[in-house]
Image: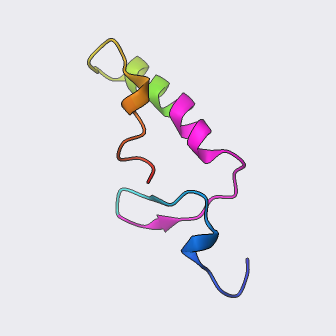
Amino acid sequence: MSEHFSLSDCDVIGFDLDHTLCRYHLKEPPGLSMTVLPGILWNTRTMIKPADFDSCHMGFLF
């Protein structure tokens, strides 16, 4: 990790539920969360169906 951290160097900025800033070294974090997380939410929890996967990123990634 470099000596100085800059948010402008990040492609995606995400916060944990307790507002902790997280830095991940993944090639495609938006694609990962938008394909895996909706499936988990709709398959294991009682969610309104049909699933609207286009709106699943709201609140998760900024």
**Residue 32 part of the magenta segment:** yes
- The tally of labels here is 0
Q: How is the image coloured?
A: rainbow
On screen, 26 above or below 45? below
On screen, 43 above or below 14? above
Which picture quadrant has residue 24?
Answer: bottom right
The image shows residue 51 at horizontal and vertical percentages of 37, 18
On screen, 60 above or below 2? above
Residue 41 shown left or right of residue 23 in the figure: left
Which picture quadrant has residue 9?
Answer: bottom right
**Residue 58 part of the magenta segment:** no
User: Which quarter of the figure is the N terminus placed in?
Assistant: bottom right
Which picture quadrant has residue 45?
Answer: top left
- Residue under the image location 48 percent in, 33 percent down: 37
User: Which quarter of the figure is the C terminus placed in?
Assistant: bottom left
The image shows residue 38 at horizontal and vertical percentages of 45, 28
- Residue under the image location 28 percent in, 20 percent down: 46
Q: Which residues are magenta?
A: 19-36
On screen, 37 above or below 50? below
The image shows residue 40 at horizontal and vertical percentages of 46, 27
Residue 21 shown left or right of residue 31 in the figure: left
